[in-house]
Image: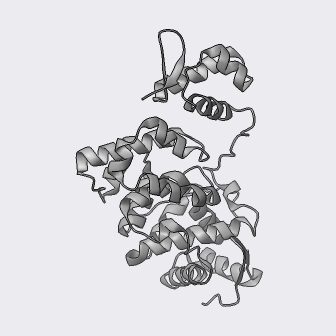
Amino acid sequence: MQFSQIIFVRFDTQYDAFMSPHLISEFRQRFASSGMTPDLVRDFQDEVMEFYEAKGRHEMEWRLHFDPYRIVVSEVMLQQTQVPRVETMYPKFIERFPNFAALAAAPQAELLAAWQGMGYNSRALRLQKLARQVTDEYGGVLPEDPELLEKLPGIGPATSCSIAAFAFNRPVVFIETNIRRVFIHYFFADDAVVDDRDILPLATACLLMNRSREWYWALMDLGTALKSSVPNPNRRSRQYVKQSAFEGSDRQVRGAVLRMLLAGDGKNIEEIACAVGKSGERVEKILDEMCGEGFFVREENGEYRMRR
């Protein structure tokens, strides 16, 4: 079965997907009646790869190089930051810190200054710890084994597999938000709630064994297209968590405090609380948390400074 009638249209850097209701309905009926047959697997793979070849985001800079360091940096950045922001920040970061050794040796304040605009700044600290561990324990050579990758700071199960796939073309199976969206849309149209445990066997059956790197790029790009063209299938995922509002959140306060102390001068709680417009009690709690995470130190005079 071919899906040649499916038309994809690109508007600048955004994708919109218009799918024939008849064809997608027929696809779902085949799965419901016969399960994941070899023919259905092949048709699904063809559908995904045809989309990728025609409309995939081939130009993204981290897809132009298979250098493990660059893959690690991009995957950590993409964990909690939208693609357009990463596209802007990634080249500058790589230029300043071109390899594990350079990142490992960087002054922390310089690293955090380079990370500004990415959000979730603790990722930068974990990324530097990862670089130091790779440099010290592996001689600067990133291990290929996902189990070893998962032991590195800031790397969870999905990220360890994505790094293994993109850096080394390893035939691993993992689920992230865009991959989840594709499988729910294609195979679970009538399910009110879908668990990742239901998706995993399908993801395993459909993996293009010798092209896992391209396969996951294709799934992620198709998932992005679906996001702008159909009601978000991920809302039916048991793993779906709606992101809390940023305005007024501790995350916003943390970012403001970090920017203030990156200026270089030590500040006490009263000065910081006044500057960010929050209570001293709330700011002190946040400062203590960030000291524990390795961002700041508290001097004997009560001032907070960047950790050196």
| Residue 202 visible, this angle | no
Residue lying at 68% horizontally and 19% vertically, measured from the top left: 273
Give whichever of 97, 124 is nearer the camera.
97
Horizontal side of 235 relative to 90 (left or right) equals right
**Color style of the picture:** one colour
x, y (%) of residue 159?
A: 45, 54
Residue 185 higher or lower than 48, as above or below: above
Horizontal side of 201 relative to 223 (left or right) equals left
Residue 260 higher or lower than 189, as above or below: above
x, y (%) of residue 121?
A: 54, 40
Q: Quadrant of the N terminus?
A: bottom right
x, y (%) of residue 7?
A: 71, 84
Give whichever of 195, 264 is nearer the camera.
264
| Picture quadrant where residue 212 is located | bottom left
Q: Quadrant of the C terminus?
A: top left
Residue lying at 55% horizontally and 69% vertically, measured from the top left: 60
Residue 207 higher or lower than 273, as above or below: below
| Picture quadrant where residue 129 is located | top left
Residue lying at 27% horizontally and 53% vertically, measured from the top left: 140
x, y (%) of residue 29?
A: 66, 78
Total marks shown come to 0
Residue lying at 45% horizontally and 29% vertically, measured from the top left: 294
Give whichever of 176, 203 is nearer the camera.
176
| Residue 34 visible, this angle | yes
| Picture quadrant where residue 142 is located | bottom left
